[in-house]
Image: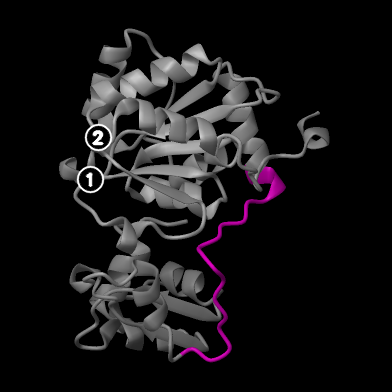
């Protein structure tokens, strides 16, 4: 898992002549490259094809022009040139036993037993403030879940420091916090939780792809477009706190397919 801001991608944007030996070695490991960006001059496609990648598609899904069409359908539409590609019902991430063990170990280090029957990952941030449910309401739901003896993992990226601080201020206490971690670590920890609760965000989509029941609060974004996959449970942010709390409780009764099997915890 690499950052889009890293050299691997910026060198592609610069063109074939700018590809370092390290970048060439990295990309030559792949048989298929899918890049969802505008490539008006064909530079990215040319760079990838020069590396002998057998199948390359570079196309923007134009998500800002979606209308009422599901984002998943728009993304699938960009792959029509790839023969023999089959799509499932929704996105799917498959974790290795090593990944799951990493997530279980993180929980143990932060005081959460791997035997805990109910662990909820909460992500109160998003890429846009207009998509964020108020911090005090998150704190209220978390407080009541803690009262049910449900363990909480508060997740925050680099841009979420302020909202995490506000949630903790309203809580009046600290809970286990996964802050500023690599996306691979976030996925590992999510894979050992029993449900997700948060805004419409990238972290929500990772949780859903892992098979977690993901209670996603939608404000300015449209759930018909962005509630991708069968694991997402969309709720509007203007619902009462009690309604959203009940939805999270109900989500915990759903099965989760990513948890580490007990023998591997020994």
Distance of label 2 from label 1 (alpha carbons): 8 Å
The residue at 43%/91% (across/down) is: 81
Residue at x-position 26% and y-position 69%:
68
Disc marking residue 133: 2
Element under disc 1: loop
Q: Residues within 10 Å of mark 2 (few under 14, many from 20)?
A: many
Q: Which label is found at residue 219?
A: 1
Question: What is the residue that sits farthest to the left in this orientation?
Answer: 130
Corner quadrant of residue 100: top right
Does residue 73 lie above or below 102 as drawn? below
Q: Position of residue 165 (x, y in %)?
A: 26, 20
Q: Image quadrant of residue 171? A: top left
Main SS of residues in magenta: loop
Answer few, some or many: residues within 10 Å of disc 1's Cα (few below 14, many 20 plus, some between 14 and 19): some
Can you give x and y, in whole percent of width and height, for residue 28 in the image?
52, 77
Q: Out of 191 and 248, give the one closest to the viewer.
A: 248
Tell me the tag on residue 168.
Answer: none
Q: Quadrant of the C terminus?
A: top right
State which region is magenta.
82-99
Q: Residue at x 27, y 43 (%)?
A: 126
Q: Is residue 245 magenta?
A: no
Residue 107 appears at what percent x and percent y? 58, 26
Q: Secondary structure at mark 2?
A: loop
Q: In the rendered view, how is the structure colored?
A: one colour
- The answer to whether residue 231 is above or below residue 191 is below
Q: Is residue 163 visible?
A: yes
Q: Is residue 91 magenta?
A: yes
Picture coordinates of residue 236, whole percent (x, y) = 29, 43
Choose the circle earlier in sequence order: 2 or 1: 2
Kindly indicate whether the residue at mark 1 contacts the one at mark 2 (C-beta within 8 angstroms).
Answer: yes
Residue 155 seen in render: no
């Amino acid at each position: 898992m690499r950052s889009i801001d890293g050299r691997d991608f910026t060198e592609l944007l610069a063109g074939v002549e700018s590809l370092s030996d390290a970048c060439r070695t990295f990309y030559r490991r792949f048989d298929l490259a899918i890049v969802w960006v505008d490539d008006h001059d064909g530079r990215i496609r040319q760079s990838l094809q020069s590396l002998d990648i057998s199948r390359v598609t570079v196309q923007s899904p134009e998500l800002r022009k979606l209308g009422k069409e599901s984002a998943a359908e728009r993304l699938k539409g960009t792959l029509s040139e790839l023969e023999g590609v089959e799509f499932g019902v929704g996105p799917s991430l498959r974790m290795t036993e090593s990944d799951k063990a990493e997530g279980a170990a993180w929980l143990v280090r932060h005081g959460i037993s791997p035997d805990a029957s109910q662990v909820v990952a909460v992500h109160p941030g998003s890429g846009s403030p207009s998509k964020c449910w108020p911090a005090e309401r998150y704190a209220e739901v978390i407080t009541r879940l803690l009262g049910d003896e449900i363990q909480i993992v508060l997740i925050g990226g680099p841009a979420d420091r302020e909202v995490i601080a506000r949630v903790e201020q309203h809580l009046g206490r600290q809970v286990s916090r996964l802050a500023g971690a690599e996306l691979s670590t976030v996925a590992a920890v999510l894979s050992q939780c029993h449900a997700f609760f948060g805004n419409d965000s990238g972290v929500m989509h990772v949780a859903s792809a892992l098979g977690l029941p993901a209670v996603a609060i939608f404000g300015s974004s449209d759930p018909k477009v962005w509630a991708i996959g069968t694991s997402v449970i969309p709720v509007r942010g203007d619902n009462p706190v009690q309604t959203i709390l009940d939805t999270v409780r109900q989500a915990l009764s759903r099965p989760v397919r990513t948890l580490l099997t007990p023998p591997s915890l020994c």
